[in-house]
Image (cartoon, rainbow, N blue to C red):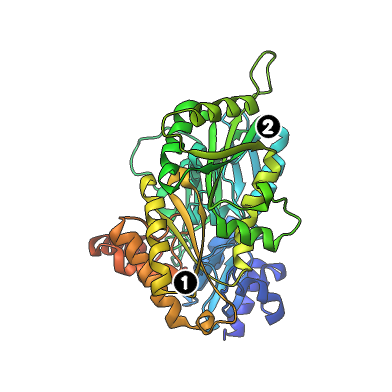
Amino acid sequence: MIDQGHIAALTGILGDKGIVTEPGDMAAYETGARYDEGRAALVLRPQTTEEVSAAVGYCVKNGIALIPQSGNTGLVSGATPDATGAQAVLSLDRMTQRFEVDLDNRSLRAGAGLRLSDVNQKLEKHGLFFPIDLGADPRLGGMLATNTGGSRFLKYGDVRRNALGIKVVLADESGTVLDLTSELRKNNTGIDWKQIFIGTSGAFGIITECVLNLEPLPKQVATAYLVPASGAHVMPLLRAMEDRLGAYLSAFEGMSKNSVAAALDHAPSLKNPFQGGKVPDYVILAEVSRTWEPREGEQSLDSVLETVLAEIWESDDAPLADAFVGPAHEMWALRHALSEGVKHSGKLIAFDLSFRRGDIMAFCDRMKDEMPHTFPEVTICDFGHIGDGGVHFNLVVPKDSGSAADKDFERRLRDRVFAIAVQDFNGSFSAEHAIGRKNQAYYDLYTQQKIKDMAQGLKAITSPGDLGTVRFG
């Protein structure tokens, strides 16, 4: 699908290791993390910003569409090519050379191709980490392009909050490089241009390097499973924990009975921590942490957490039905197993939604009342970041159901869920997965025309070439 002359020219720019054309070798770049499949014309694998610039400039001049791809762990079809075979994938997987830690500034300058696990492994010896906790293992460029959040957003915020600077290549005929890699935390000298490229799915440019804020690794951690007295008691419980724990509280993760059951069924090695093996209707994983070593005479975090839970238990209209403190690695193992467990329990139709914190449980209750009547085949397996208003609202259809492969069924289901989330609850149809092909129609539907016009103008200024899967205009 691409002229051999283009392949020869791009090989001259990137070298033999920088280009992939064999179908078998391209398969990993054509298949996404969740039901995504496409067909690439070729795969470009630059190693430096200069190579990205030269390759992008060449492609724009010659009308070759580009799909930036980082770790290929996205869930909304934002990084896979379409089925035409006419798009080139530009992968960041070789951009891993730069890794410069500034201990005084508590920051990291790094290549966009480094994986989160590699970054944190290298930082561990310095007692630091990049504080975005995810079930997947993405590369930094993709994390910035989608503004990922994660399980500890409550304490540390999202990628946008922890990004100090970036370097980005624009999709124009020059492959223009914008060096926005400031290491300053305070710089009010005009527009914060890096934010144009963070969270916008690569539509305005390809991030090749970044400067990140780092945080001290927690030296003390305590976790507990909390069973709220009812759905209406979840937010009073969160407020009570925040009032008593302050900055110690680092996670407050909600898990429905169906999602926990799916995880336990998929991973029998997981320990079922609940009395008699009976999973409650709803469970919250709470975590508290400190960044210093235990001091003599200081109350341990386990004791702090137990004391707080006892206070809440004894309060008027206590929001707790049950609670127990346990080993952090076991409790987080169950939480991190939810995604794969739900995915393997049937055909998964996933939603990444956010609300005002007080509306999460009301939305979930509304859907649990409605779904049996409107979509009776569907099982709700929700879980999410209650502390920051996010919920992974997962709907599972039996694999042997005719609806599992029915695109019209999925469209009607998505239309209904998004309508309730956005129109009735003023929520967001994409909390932290950004915009991809799966969300494009809902961006078009729910975004003000003036905003779309402004985005179209920005796209024309920054990257007029055919870049990415998202159309913001």
Question: Mark 1, residues whose alpha carbon is within 10 Å: few (<14), some, or many (≥20)?
Answer: many
Vertical placement of residue 32 versus 255, above or below:
below
Dividing the picture into quarters, in which one does residue 16 lie?
bottom right
**Callout 2, which amino acid?**
Gly
Which quadrant, please, contains the N terminus?
Answer: bottom right
Report the number of discs. Answer: 2
Q: Which residue carries the number 2 mark? A: 127
In depth, the one of 123 and 274 nearer the eye is 274
Q: Earlier in the sequence, mark 2 or mark 1?
A: 1
Q: Position of residue 54 (x, y in %)?
A: 55, 64
Q: Residue lying farthest right?
A: 269
Q: Which residue carries the number 1 mark? A: 60
Q: Secondary structure at mark 2?
A: loop
Question: Mark 2, residues whose alpha carbon is within 10 Å: few (<14), some, or many (≥20)?
Answer: some
Q: Residue at x 36, y 70 (%)?
A: 416
Q: CA distance from mark 2 to mark 1?
A: 43 Å
Q: Position of residue 442 (x, y in %)?
A: 36, 68
